[in-house]
Amino acid sequence: MALKAKTIKKKARKIAKNAVAEGEKAVKKAVKQISKAAAPKVKELKKAVAKAAAPKVKALKKQAGKLQDAAGKQLAKGVKEAKKMVKETLEASSKQLAKAAKKM
């Protein structure tokens, strides 16, 4: 009787392993079918999201361009003022040098 019980346990384990393997195959197959069936809907949703976001992206790009223009204008203004200051400084220095030269 002990041999029969041992053989039965072995058979039971083998059947259980096969059942688990079959179950895994079935799950993989189902997942594959579901993903295949959902692919067009996913693609459609991606397009819808991109389309919905397009105006926001466009507005952000426009705003970034405006900020860049404003920064460029500020930079140009700063450069212009710096040139003016350098020019005034050089003129003042030349006037002082001329006065000093006259005194000599």
Image: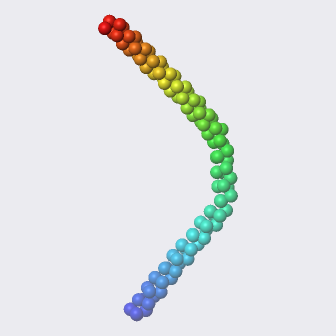
Is residue 15 visible in this depiction of the protein?
yes
Task: Identify the residue at horizontal 38%, vertical 92% (top origin).
Answer: 2
Quadrant occupied by the N terminus: bottom left
Image-quadrant location for residue 33: bottom right
Q: Position of residue 15 (x, y in %)?
A: 50, 82
Is residue 85 visible in this depiction of the protein?
no
Image-quadrant location for residue 51: top right
Image-quadrant location for residue 8: bottom left
Q: Position of residue 97 (x, y in %)?
A: 36, 12
Task: Identify the residue at horizontal 50%, vertical 27% (top origin).
Answer: 75
Q: Nearer the viewer, residue 73 or 49?
A: 73
Q: Position of residue 80 (x, y in %)?
A: 50, 22
Q: Position of residue 70 (x, y in %)?
A: 55, 27
Numbered-mark total: 0
- Left or right of 28, for residue 48: right
Q: Is residue 53 above or below residue 46?
A: above
Q: Is residue 7 above or below residue 72?
A: below
Task: Identify the residue at horizontal 63%, vertical 42% (top origin).
Answer: 53
Q: Is residue 62 above or below residue 20?
A: above
Task: Identify the residue at horizontal 52%, vertical 80% (top origin).
Answer: 18
Q: Nearer the viewer, residue 21 or 38?
A: 38
Quadrant occupied by the C terminus: top left
